[in-house]
Amino acid sequence: MIKNLKIYNKPKNKMKLCALSLASVLLVGGLSGCGNDNIPNVVYGEDFKIESVVSQTFEPGEHIISIPINDPTDNVMQHTFYPGYKCVGMGTSSYGDFEFFAGACLLYVNDTEVVCNSLDGKTFTSFGTPVNYEKYENTIAKNGERTFGIGEHIISIPIPDPTDDIVQYQAFEGYEAIDIATAAYGDFDFFAGAAILYVNTVPVKCTPTHGSNGNYLYLTFGTPIEPEKTLNKTLEN
């Protein structure tokens, strides 16, 4: 990869380019020869350091990563599940005198052993691959009805200002509320929106609210799926 690359225009002089090392110069245009005519602009910087991809194994709880999301205070949103990770938090912010959205994010932590790749060997900003992961078999019916494994159905709901008074929130069977995100704007701390984040704790069956042909959104809470019961027969002598 290229580190600390700085871009300058080459001074107009009569120096030849033949002696320049390709390890420290990247030519933007093609050279027609080693003469003084048609000298292209070049990029000067540190020597190129092409590094190989570095892999690292993270034990549960060791790989913590956040991803930007759209404004969760505007509408109900379904968020992405990543195998081997659990969603543990949400944040949002606003700015200005007229309530401009300043950004939001979700926080994830790996709950199983994962292998991650890095280009610089220091930061691992992509979700890893689970080493041993038992994936719940998701099935999508023709009408779009789908089953979600534990932690796979992540949904946020806009709420009124939770900083104004004590608020009780609704509990949904099969889900837990894991976080609240709030935002304010202006010089006098005007409320800019808030949302509460839920994640399913058991397998659930959901009905789609939007979409078709396999591309669906599930913006309502699902119904918990009863685990299969094993019948033990007692043999009489």
Image (cartoon, rainbow, N blue to C red):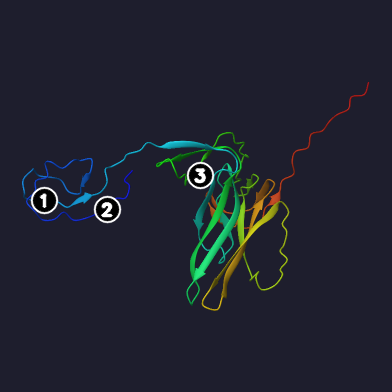
Residue at image location 66% in from the left, 50% down from the top: 200
- Residue 44 % position (x, y): 22, 50
* Residue neighbourhood size for the residue with mark 3, other residues' Cα within 10 Å, grouped as few (<14), some (14–19), many (≥20): many
On the image, numbered disc 3 is attached to which residue? 127
Q: Earlier in the sequence, mark 2 or mark 3?
A: 2
Tell me the amino acid under the disc marked 3. Answer: Phe
On the image, numbered disc 2 is attached to which residue? 6
Instruction: Residue 49: give its label.
Output: none
On the image, numbered disc 1 is attached to which residue? 39
Q: Is residue 169 above or below residue 81?
A: below
CA distance separating discs 3 and 1: 44 Å
Tell me the amino acid under the disc marked 2. Answer: Lys
Residue at image location 73% in from the left, 66% down from the top: 168
Tell me the amino acid under the disc marked 1. Answer: Ile
The residue at the far top in this view is 237
Q: Mark 2, mark 1: which one is toward the viewer?
A: 2
